[in-house]
């Protein structure tokens, strides 16, 4: 059986195991379950890593506490948490009880380290092989960041530039802005777009792949005099023998995201809904704009649209109405 963080019983077991609150018999039973599926092992290891980060000496305790307190206040206001988690003097979280709050503590630690500002740059990392981190940029563009990948951009992004640096693999859904083109720098190319959606994979000087879903993309190889290549929907551009080569791709990159584990960290509901609509071709609407400002940290694991809607409604205390092809979320 595969562990699913959307199931309360699984969350409880994982939290107790990582926190060391299980009895010997419970540990034996849980480790048997973990060993039955490689995805379970990966999930447990990722959780342990996040948990260990909370207890490292590198954490600046005042900032960590402030991050937790700010987020917990928002969570309490949004009825996401019914129990309390406290930080001890070493900055490590102790369980008073377990509900959604415990997993949020881990999310706080992850956000605290991956959303760090380094030399005026905001750095976003997705460290889990099994999870696609969905991040919304200040201009409304969305990035679906694959595991072991990283993007960075300046704090002034969208004010006078829309430049992003990518190392790894991501799907980009770019907001159109004719005045400020969107550019992506990879280890071996520079990419420029106006408004489009496409996937990019570039992990080193000789590794590059780009597949266009919509719009057009201009790709220029670094350190060469070769001209730019313009890719249209359905085009696939790869780096072969140090030359960019264009071919046709039969599978749209967006289709692959539907089977991914999508993770959102402290994202406004409006951004989450737009991402679900994009990846699953759904038509979910919000009953009022104010609902869209409420923030949520959640992971969807191969969920259907209906199950994702139910999870959101349960977490935020919303109601849902199904009307033909439209799903409306509203505050009772």
Image (cartoon, rainbow, N blue to C red):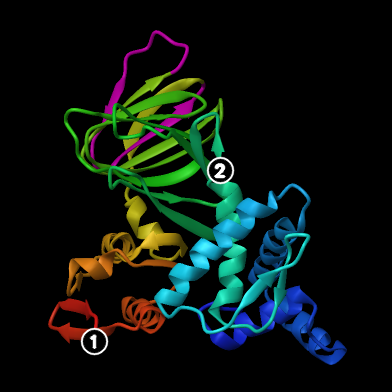
The numbered mark at residue 100 is none
How busy is the neighbourhood of tag 1: few (under 14 within 10 Å), some, or many (20 plus)? few
Real-space Cα separation, disc 1 to disc 2, in angstroms: 37 Å
Residue 103: % across, % down: 59, 72
Magenta includes 316? no
Q: Are marks 1 and 2 in contact (CB under 8 Å)?
A: no
What residue is shown with label 2?
116
Pick the residue in front: 211 or 164.
164
Vertical relation: 180 (above or below) 137: above
Kind of element beneath mark 1: loop
Q: Residue furthest left?
A: 324
Query: Is 234 colored magenta in this rendering?
Result: yes
- Residue at 72% over, 77% down: 34
Q: Residues within 10 Å of mark 2 (few under 14, many from 20)?
A: some
The N terminus sits in image quarter: bottom right
Confirm whether residue 258 shows in the render: yes
Q: Does 189 appear above or below 55?
A: above
Picture quarter with the C terminus: bottom left
Where does the image place residue 181, in percent across and percent down from the top left? 25, 29
Residue at mark 1: 332
Percent position of residue 257, x then y = 40, 59
Rendered image quadrant of residue 88: bottom right
- Tell me if 158 is positioned left or right of 301 in this view: left
Residue pictured at 65% horizontal, 53% vertical: 62
The residue lying furthest to the right in this view is 24
Residue 300 seen from this side? no
Q: Is residue 32 left or right of residue 255?
A: right
- Quadrant of res 65: bottom right
Where 25 sits versus 293, above or below?
Answer: below
State the extent of the magenta-drawn residues as a range: 222-241
Looking at this view, name the residue that lies furthest to the top: 225
- Comparing 290 with 202, the one in front is 290
């Amino acid at each position: 059986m595969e562990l699913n963080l959307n199931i309360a019983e699984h969350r409880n077991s994982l939290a107790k195991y990582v926190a060391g609150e299980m009895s010997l018999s419970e540990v034996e039973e849980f480790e048997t379950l973990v060993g039955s599926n490689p995805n379970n092992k990966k999930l447990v290891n990722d959780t342990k890593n996040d948990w260990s980060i909370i207890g490292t000496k590198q954490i600046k305790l005042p900032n960590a506490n402030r991050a937790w307190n700010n987020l917990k206040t928002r969570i309490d206001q949004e009825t996401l948490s019914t129990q309390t988690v406290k930080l001890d003097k070493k900055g490590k979280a102790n369980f008073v009880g377990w509900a959604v709050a415990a997993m949020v503590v881990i999310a706080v630690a992850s956000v605290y380290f991956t959303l760090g500002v380094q030399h005026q740059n905001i750095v976003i990392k997705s460290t889990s092989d099994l999870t696609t981190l969905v991040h919304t940029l200040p201009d409304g563009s969305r990035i679906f960041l694959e595991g072991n990948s990283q993007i960075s951009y300046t704090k002034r992004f969208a004010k006078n530039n829309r430049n992003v640096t990518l190392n790894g693999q991501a799907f980009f859904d770019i907001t159109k802005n004719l005045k400020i083109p969107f550019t992506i720098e990879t280890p071996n190319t520079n990419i420029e777009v106006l408004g489009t959606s496409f996937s990019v994979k570039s992990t080193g000087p000789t590794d590059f792949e780009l597949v266009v879903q919509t719009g057009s993309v201009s790709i220029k190889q670094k350190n060469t005099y070769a001209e730019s290549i313009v890719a249209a929907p359905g085009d696939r551009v790869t780096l072969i023998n140090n030359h960019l080569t264009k071919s046709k791709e039969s599978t749209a990159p967006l289709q692959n995201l539907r089977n991914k584990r999508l993770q959102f960290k402290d994202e406004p509901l409006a951004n989450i809904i737009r991402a679900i609509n994009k990846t699953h071709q759904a038509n979910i609407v919000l009953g009022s704009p104010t609902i869209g400002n409420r923030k949520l940290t959640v992971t969807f694991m191969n969920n259907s649209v209906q199950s994702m809607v139910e999870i959101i409604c349960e977490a935020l205390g919303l109601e849902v109405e199904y009307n033909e092809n439209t799903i409306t979320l509203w505050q009772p």
